Image (tube, grey):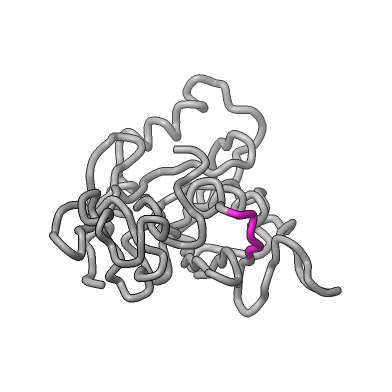
Amino acid sequence: MTRISSKGTCSYCGGSYSKSTILRHLQACPARKTENEAPSKKGSGKGVAKTIFHLQVEGLYLPMYWLHIEIPAKATLDDLDSFLRDLWLECCGHLSSFEIQGQSFFSEKFEPGDRSMRFALEKVIAPGMKFEHIYDFGTSTELLIKVISAREGQAQGKGAVIMARNDPPDIRCNTCGKPATAICCICSDEGTGYVCDDCAKKHECGEDMLLPLVNSPRTGMCGYTGECYD
């Protein structure tokens, strides 16, 4: 498949930036700084500031799908797994794992001694690290996660916050060049399964093999049709 350029939107200011410049923007975004400072200015902050990780998440083999998120360091791997499932991955309740510095952490244990995802992030990751997330051990979707930085601030619960996300990639129909709307789950491995509405009706594998083209690295896999929330 031809490499696809990727742009995304800042959740704070609404600006559009390329994948290569979004990090620099987030570090300087006035709207983000204002929001991060708002609780202390209003006097609504409770207790001591908490450590918050900045993570960059992208498809390991489809890097045009990416996110920049913040998540409290005391959140667990299970919290992060649930977030990724809801936004990008969940289709049939498959198992998943994190691979961190040679250690595996599973959503469900297979054997005695297997590590669960109940570990707090601060116990297993740190700024500068890279690790992977795997969803579905049959038709796998693999994500690369980079720990960009950590900061002290106010966090609401243990949930992740999306700071920026890629816009839906401009993917074209392999037959006619119009914007693609579906992907064939049989042809997708060859990078030739993208079809528009018109060409979908004539696709050789049949319309029952087509899945909607969605903004996720799991597009075209298993029965995935879109995120649980937007």
Q: Residue at x 37, y 31 (%)?
A: 34
Q: Residue 184: x percent and y percent?
A: 36, 63
Magenta range: 92-96
Q: Main secondary structure of the magenta part?
A: loop
Report the label total: 0
* Furthest-right residue in this view: 112
Q: Is residue 168 above or below residue 45?
A: below
Q: Residue 26: x percent and y percent?
A: 33, 47
Q: Residue 96: x percent and y percent?
A: 63, 63
Magenta-drawn stretch contains 93: yes
Front-most of 38 and 132? 132
Please give left or right for residue 158 compared with residue 62 in the image.
Answer: right
Q: Is residue 212 above or below residue 34?
A: below
Task: Work out whether residue 21 can be spotted.
Answer: no
Front-most of 143 and 15? 143
Please give left or right for residue 212 compared with residue 203 in the image.
Answer: right
Please give left or right for residue 30 compared with residue 69 in the image.
Answer: left
Magenta-drawn stretch contains 104: no
For residue 172, what is the image quadrant?
bottom left
Q: Is residue 149 above or below residue 141?
A: above
Q: Residue at x 51, y 49 (%)?
A: 151
Q: Is residue 150 above or below residue 47?
A: below
Q: Residue 113: x percent and y percent?
A: 83, 74
Q: Residue at x 56, y 53 (%)?
A: 91
Task: Work out whether residue 4 can be spotted.
Answer: yes
For residue 216, what is the image quadrant?
bottom left
Q: Quadrant of the N terminus?
A: bottom left
Please give left or right for residue 91 compared with residue 194 in the image.
Answer: right
Q: Quadrant of the C terminus?
A: top left
